[in-house]
Image (tube, rainbow, N blue to C red):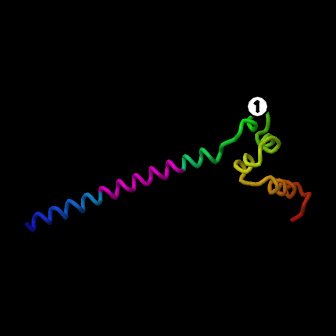
Amino acid sequence: MEDFWILVCASWCCRDGEFKSLREEFNEMLLDEEWRRVMRTRHALTAECLTSPSVSACMCMYTNGTDANFLNVTSLMRYAFETLQLQSTGAVKC
C-alpha cells in the first residue's frame, strides 16, 4: 500500500511540473494577444489623416488630424507640441 501512495505522489509531482509549463505558456499567449490588441487600438487613425505620399505626414497630421489622432501618434497634446516647436526655433526661452 505504501508503494501505491509513493507512485501517486510521484505522478502528482510530475503532473504539477507539466501544468506549470502549460500555465506559463498560456500566460505568455494572453500577454501576446493583449499586446496586439493594444497596438491595434492605440495607432488607429481616421481617413482624414491619410493623404498622398508627396505630402509630409507630420504636417498633414498637424493641420488635418484631430487632437486624438495627434496624441496617439506623437504622445503629445497639441499645446505641448507647439510649445516645443517655439522653443526649438528660439522664439520662446525656457
The image quadrant of residue 82 is: bottom right
Q: Is residue 33 magenta?
A: yes
Q: Amino acid at mark 1?
A: Ser
Q: Is residue 1 magenta?
A: no
Q: Is residue 33 left or right of residue 70?
A: left
Magenta range: 18-34
Location of the N terminus by quadrant is bottom left
Q: Position of residue 28 (x, y in %)?
A: 44, 53
Looking at this view, name the residue that lies furthest to the bottom: 2
Dominant secondary structure of the residues highlighted in magenta in the image:
helix
Residue appearing at x 46%, y 51% in the figure = 30
Looking at the image, which is closer to me, 87 or 81?
A: 81
Q: Residue furthest left?
A: 1
Query: Which residue is painted at 30% across and 56% down in the image?
Result: 18
Which residue is labeled 1 in the image?
Answer: 52
Residue at image location 11% in from the left, 63% down from the top = 4
Residue lying at 29% horizontally and 59% vertically, measured from the top left: 17
Residue 50, position as x, y percentages in the image:
73, 35
